[in-house]
Image: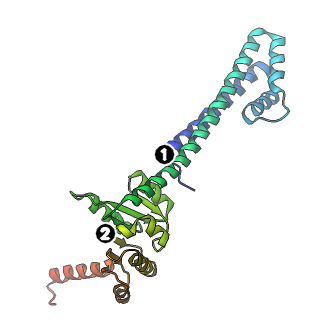
Amino acid sequence: MERLSESSWNVIISSIIISTVLIALSIVVLYLITNNAYLDAYYIIDTFFNAPNSAATWDLAQLALTYHFQKFATVLSIVIIDNIGKLLVVSFIIAAVVDMVSFANLEKYISRVHAKRMKGHIIICGYNELSKRLIGELLGAKKKPKIVVIESNEEVIVDLHHRHIPVIEGGCSSMRSLKLASADKAKMIIFVKQNDAENLIGAVEARKLNKEIKILVRGTKEEVMTKMYRAGVDMCVLPEYLAGISIGEYIAKHLGVQR
C-alpha cells in the first residue's frame, strides 16, 4: 500500500475531529432535553452509522413536540446538523482516499512517461546513502543530467516522487524495470545495491539492452571485481576499500609511517 500523502492525513484527521465533536455535542444537547442517554445513543448510532430499522429520530421529534416547540426546534436542528456532519465526514474520507490513490497512480504514470521519453540519461539502480549523495551531486551540477531511479521500496518511491525525481518501481536486475527506465537509450547506468549478485545480474541485463551504455557498479568484495569486468562492467568501485585506503593514508601521514 502506498504511504498516505500529508494532505490525505490532514483530511482524515480533520474528518475524525469533526465527527467526534459533532457526536459529543449532539449527545450533550439531546441529553439536556430528553434525560434519556439510551435514546440519545440510539439516535447517534442511527445518524452516523446508519443502524437498520431504527426510529430514534422520529422518537426524539415526538418527545420534543410533546413538551414544547422550542425543544422540537432544537432537536430538529441537531438532526439536520448531524446529517450534514455525516455527509461532510464521508466526503472528507472519500477525498482522502481519492487523493491517495490518484497521487500514487498519477506519479507512477508520469515517471514511466518521463523515462520512456528520455535519451542519453543516467539510470541509478537502488537508493541508499551512496546513491542519495550521488543524486545530490548530479542535481547540484551546473548542467544537470537527466536521472531515472529504479527502486522497490515504496516509502523511497513516494519520497522521490515528492522530489520530482522519476522513479521506476521494480527490481534492479529485472529486464522489465530496465526497459521501463529506457536503458536501451541511456548513456550510463549505475548499480549501487549492497548485493553483488543482484548488481552483476543487472549489469548483464543492461548490456543486453544497450551495447554502448557505460556501466558502473558498486562492489562489496575484491574477488567480485574480476567477475564484474568479465560481465562487461566499465567501472567497479568498492567504497569500503577506498575508505580504508584513505583512512590508512591519513594515519600514515600524521604518524610519520613510512610506506
Q: Position of residue 253 (x, y in %)?
A: 15, 81
Q: Please state, as top left, top right, bottom left or bottom right, where the C terminus lies in the image.
A: bottom left
Pick the front one: 230 or 60: 230
In the image shown, does 171 or 66 lie closer to the viewer?
A: 171
Q: Which quarter of the picture shows residue 95?
A: top right
Name above or below for residue 197 compared with residue 120.
below
The residue under label 1 is 6
Q: Which mark is residue 187?
A: 2
At x 38%, y 72%, the residue is 192
- Say above or below: 104 vs 238: above
Counting from the top left corner in percent of width and height, residue 137 is at 27, 62
Q: Quadrant of the N terminus?
A: bottom right
Q: Position of residue 78 (x, y in %)?
A: 70, 21
- Which amino acid is tagged 1? Glu
* Residue 188 as seen in the image, left or right of residue 175: left
Q: Is residue 82 left or right of residue 69?
A: left
Towards the viewer: 43 or 196: 196
Closer to the chain start, of discs 1 and 2, is 1
Mark 2 secondary-structure assignment:
loop
What is the crowding at mark 1: few (fewer than 14 residues within 10 Å), some, or many (at least 20)? few
| Residue found 52% across the figure and 40% down from its top | 10
